[in-house]
Image (cartoon, helix red, strand yellow):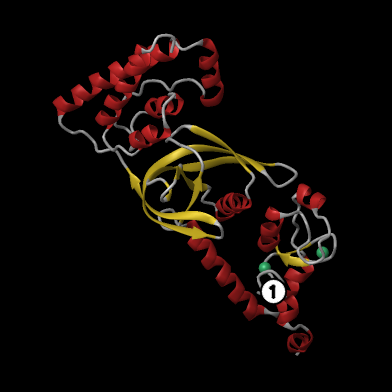
Amino acid sequence: IFSSQYHYILDPNDLECSLCMRLFYEPVTTPCGHTFCKNCLERCLDHTPQCPLCKESLKEYLASRKYMVTSILDMLIKQYLRDEYAERVKAHQEETRELSDLTKNVPIFVCTMAYPTVPCPLHVFEPRYRLMIRRCMDTGTRQFGMCINDPQKGFADYGCMLIIRSVHFLPDGRSVVDTIGGKRFRVLSRGMKDGYSTADIKHLEDTKVKDREELEKLQDLHDAVYDQACVWFQNLKIRFHNQILQHFGPMPEREADIQATANGPAWCWWLLAVLPIDPRYQLSVLSMTSLRERLVKIQHILTYLQSIPNN
Ligand SMILES: [Zn+2]
Ligand SMILES: [Zn+2]
């Protein structure tokens, strides 16, 4: 009786978010007294630090990042609108599931070249990418694809997953995101989601060499190119040498098993990231699934760079 009585007073429409027109999910209330779903309000604040209803400044509210759920509302909804709430939770879980898929509709950051195992710090300020990074964190995937721009297609056919190691939020909502390269991928199809690009992707893996003789040759080639890379790096002007150390850290060590991972030795990717070459060229090496081909290409680049006086 108690419950049904309250159902009279408690109209689900009164507990509807004015941004998504649905029942509040994780309702937060601004200092000006307006309530929205947490996710809905955050998306508004990505664009401008104002209350979407009364336009009062929410700069300080945004800077504090303390979006506490309004527990009295949350409790009322859970207790007296049980069915509506269950529906709302189901919808939210469905959305989360869709956003968590790591091969279908994967979020794509169109910005720079990224490589497996190589750190990639990002400064995130565009609203669409703020949303993307937040979703990666909220869903728990902590991953997104990175591709360079392509004038015709929007973004390149190949890219690299970036794994978020940490996010540092600045008071105005921008953030510094520390990432490191994961799997490489090929783009199968392109899409859009809430302003940012998405793609269906297929992960790339190096084809393993099994033949013993061939593997020995590959190891010799690998050792020769590794030594050549060390010489190139050591002979670099001290200014460039130090800049590289600062941005990318030292050159990774030689690995015991050159075919241990699907991406091959880490030093190849580190080198590719620091070599002063055109991104289109870097992209072609990223897309290769043969370690031998990759080493030959790197060898050519190094030989060319070393042939230029005062490189
Ligand atoms: Zn909402
Ligand atoms: Zn307001």
Q: Quadrant of the N terminus?
A: bottom right
Please state if 108 lies on the left or on the right of 290 as rendered. right
Q: Give coordinates of residue 20: x percent, y percent.
A: 65, 70
Please state if 54 lies on the left or on the right of 103 as rendered. right
Q: Which residue is mark 1?
A: 78
Q: Give coordinates of residue 68: x percent, y percent.
A: 76, 58
Q: Give coordinates of residue 140: x percent, y percent.
A: 54, 52
Q: Is residue 246 above or below residue 66?
A: above
Q: Quadrant of the C terminus?
A: top left
Q: Is residue 51 above or below residue 134?
A: below
Q: Nearer the viewer, residue 242 or 169?
A: 242
Quick check: is the Cβ at mark 1 less than 8 Å away from ligand 1?
Answer: no
- Choose top left, top right, bottom left or bottom right for residue 25: bottom right
Q: Residue at x 77, y 64 (%)?
A: 70
Please state if 83 lies on the left or on the right of 157 as rendered. right
Total number of numbered discs in the rendering: 1
- Choose top left, top right, bottom left or bottom right for residue 90: bottom right
Q: Nearer the viewer, residue 31 or 258?
A: 31
Q: Nearer the viewer, residue 232 or 261?
A: 232
Please name the amino acid that badge 1 sits on: Lys
Which corner quadrant of the figure contains ligand 2? Answer: bottom right
Q: Dot 1, crowdedness within 10 Å: few (<14), some or many (≥20)?
A: some
Q: Give coordinates of residue 97: x percent, y percent.
A: 50, 62
Q: Is residue 229 above or below residue 104?
A: above
* Disc 1 secondary structure class: helix
View extreme (front): residue: 152
Q: Residue at x 80, y 55 (%)?
A: 58
Q: Nearer the viewer, residue 248 or 235?
A: 235
